Image (cartoon, rainbow, N blue to C red):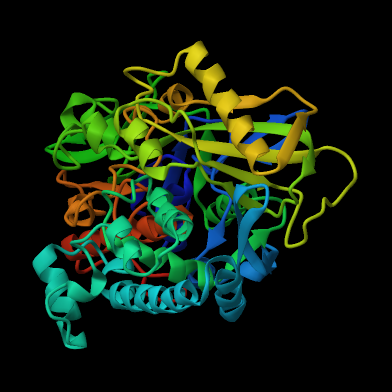
């Protein structure tokens, strides 16, 4: 009889876990409360137009090339990707902006013109350091089941590391950047990498400078938007035999003899299974949203609000844009970055926020694809207090005003053509219960943060974990890796219990 597994949540991690398991001959039922796959990789309608309302940057392509190869497919046959020549446009005022390029030397030259020769040299050194950190961690940490601290030291010792010094876990990102850049604007720009995992550059470890290497290894535009990736992954899971059910909210994970043995849906339906994969924020387990019996399955209780990663306020809209030319990815920085993070740490919306703007109809050239209004996603960081103190209407109005004011100070005037679709920390909490709206699981603050994340095997036999709140971390490619790791761990555990009945790929290929 085929092994049966229930996967809870059709975010990227759940979709990948479902596809990998189904490709192994496992009978998979994938349950999703929403009416579309993707989780945070979501799409909304604004002005009648579909728009990405979650992650907008595609990196670490190798994760998906390997995944599709594992499934006997080619990524390029299912997703059209175009490499970005310009990674992002950054602005501090109407006449101070800096583009980072996929071509490394072009970025060095741009930084030299922007901030001088010393900071151009500092950028070279920074990127060399980022590359060393990434290469040190890729095999023993990013690609592997979550190691403990001593295990990681043992795995990287062959590279001649004095302890963990080479991966810079003990100093903060902000402090490390001060050693590379004289210009405060560059420290602000590269300090923003901490926000890629919902953290503050003043508290996150310098290890996160590895993001620079990830971006220089390639950023791609996805035809159809990032939500297209979720649709393609869902199609692959279905092709492999997984059964996808939308509008299926799980109320409880069921146990039998101390082992996860299925789920009960909100409508009362019970689905039995040999194992369960939970692709959701581990805070939901600790908060009891999946039943009291699994509260401790992911380890310590739900992160306190101060330990959560950042949330966000986003606006999707159709708009006419004038002034400062836009590219696909644009950042308009606040005048005082530390004050911005002081506000967030105090649990309030920044009074003067940095604004990320994704112009979804643009690519490398500062022009629109068409002459009419264009699709925009604007985002500012917000505290993860959607379950305790969500922003008031007055605070939201002030935030929106300061957001448009920041764009205007950077030379960009936006005239909305449609009503805006606004998403707040309270909305994110409703979509992802137990998080307060935190979008990245626990914050990556302090050198121990990566070792506190839950691994793919929970403390409860038969229950496995995937998603951005688990190892190896947040972000689309990391969530995909978490799904693959969860599938690997589940199959390995089942194989050890059924040594005489190993699970193999059709045709005899074992799961790598």
Residue 34, image x, y percentages: 52, 30
Q: Nearer the viewer, residue 294 or 386?
A: 386
The answer to whether residue 466 is visible is yes
Relative side of 510 to 36, left or right: left
The residue positioned 31% from the left and 68% from the top of the image is: 179
Within the image, what quadrant is residue 48 found in? Answer: top right
Measuring from the top left, give residue 257's x and y in whole percent.
12, 37
Examine the rendered structure and indicate whether residue 443 appears above or below residue 88: above
Residue 26 shown left or right of residue 33 in the figure: left
Return the residue nearer the eye: 4 or 370: 370
Q: Quadrant of residue 309?
A: top left
Determine whether, in the image, residue 143 is placed left or right of residue 370.
left
| Residue at figure coordinates x 56%, y 59% from the top left | 58
Residue under the image location 34 percent in, 54 percent down: 473
Q: Residue furthest right?
A: 371
Q: Quadrant of the C terminus?
A: bottom left
Give left or right: position of 241 versus 434: right
Q: Position of residue 480 (x, y in %)?
A: 44, 57
Q: Residue at x 63, y 53 (%)?
A: 329
Q: Quadrant of the N terminus?
A: bottom left
Which residue appears farthest toward the left when viewing the image? 150
């Amino acid at each position: 009889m085929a092994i049966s597994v229930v996967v809870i949540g059709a975010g990227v991690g759940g979709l990948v876990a479902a596809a990998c398991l189904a490709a192994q001959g496992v009978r998979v039922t994938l349950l999703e409360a929403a009416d579309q796959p993707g989780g945070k990789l979501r799409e909304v309608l604004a002005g009648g137009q579909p728009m990405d309302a979650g992650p907008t940057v595609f990196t670490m392509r190798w994760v998906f090339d390997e995944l599709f190869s594992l499934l006997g497919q080619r990524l390029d046959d299912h997703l059209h990707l175009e490499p970005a020549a310009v990674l992002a446009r950054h602005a501090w005022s109407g006449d101070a902006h800096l583009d980072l390029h996929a071509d490394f030397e072009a970025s060095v030259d741009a930084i030299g013109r922007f901030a001088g020769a010393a900071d151009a040299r500092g950028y070279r050194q920074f990127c060399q350091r980022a590359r060393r950190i990434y290469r040190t961690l890729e095999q023993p940490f990013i690609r592997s089941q979550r190691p403990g601290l001593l295990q990681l030291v043992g795995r990287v010792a062959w590279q001649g590391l004095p302890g963990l010094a080479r991966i810079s876990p003990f100093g903060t990102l902000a402090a490390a950047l001060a050693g590379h850049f004289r210009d405060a604007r560059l420290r602000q720009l590269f300090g923003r990498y901490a926000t890629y995992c919902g953290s503050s550059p003043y508290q996150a470890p310098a290890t996160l400078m590895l993001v620079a290497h990830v971006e220089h290894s390639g950023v791609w535009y996805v035809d159809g938007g990032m939500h297209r990736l979720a649709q393609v992954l869902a199609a692959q899971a279905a092709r492999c035999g997984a059964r996808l059910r939308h509008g299926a909210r799980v109320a409880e994970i069921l146990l039998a003899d101390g082992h996860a043995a299925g789920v009960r849906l909100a409508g009362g339906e019970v689905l039995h299974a040999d194992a369960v994969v939970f692709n959701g924020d581990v805070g939901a387990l600790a908060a009891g949203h999946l039943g009291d019996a699994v509260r401790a399955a992911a380890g310590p209780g739900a992160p306190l609000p101060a330990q959560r990663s950042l949330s966000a306020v986003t606006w999707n809209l159709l708009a006419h844009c004038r002034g400062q030319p836009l590219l696909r990815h644009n950042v308009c920085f606040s005048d005082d970055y530390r004050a911005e993070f002081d506000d967030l740490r105090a649990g309030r919306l920044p009074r003067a926020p940095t604004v990320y703007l994704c112009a979804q109809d643009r690519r490398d050239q500062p022009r629109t694809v068409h002459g009419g209004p264009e699709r925009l996603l604007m985002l500012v960081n917000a505290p993860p207090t959607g379950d305790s103190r969500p922003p008031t209407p007055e605070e939201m109005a002030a935030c929106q005003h300061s957001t448009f004011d920041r764009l205007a100070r950077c030379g960009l005037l936006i005239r909305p053509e449609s009503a805006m679709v606004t998403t707040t920390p309270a909305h994110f909490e409703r979509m992802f219960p137990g998080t307060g709206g935190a979008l990245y699981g626990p914050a990556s603050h302090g050198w121990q943060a990566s070792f506190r994340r839950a691994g793919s095997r929970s403390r409860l036999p038969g229950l496995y974990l995937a998603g951005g709140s688990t190892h190896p971390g947040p972000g689309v490619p990391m969530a995909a890796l978490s799904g693959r790791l969860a599938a690997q761990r589940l199959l390995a555990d089942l194989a050890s219990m059924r040594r005489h009945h190993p699970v193999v790929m059709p045709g005899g290929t074992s799961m790598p």
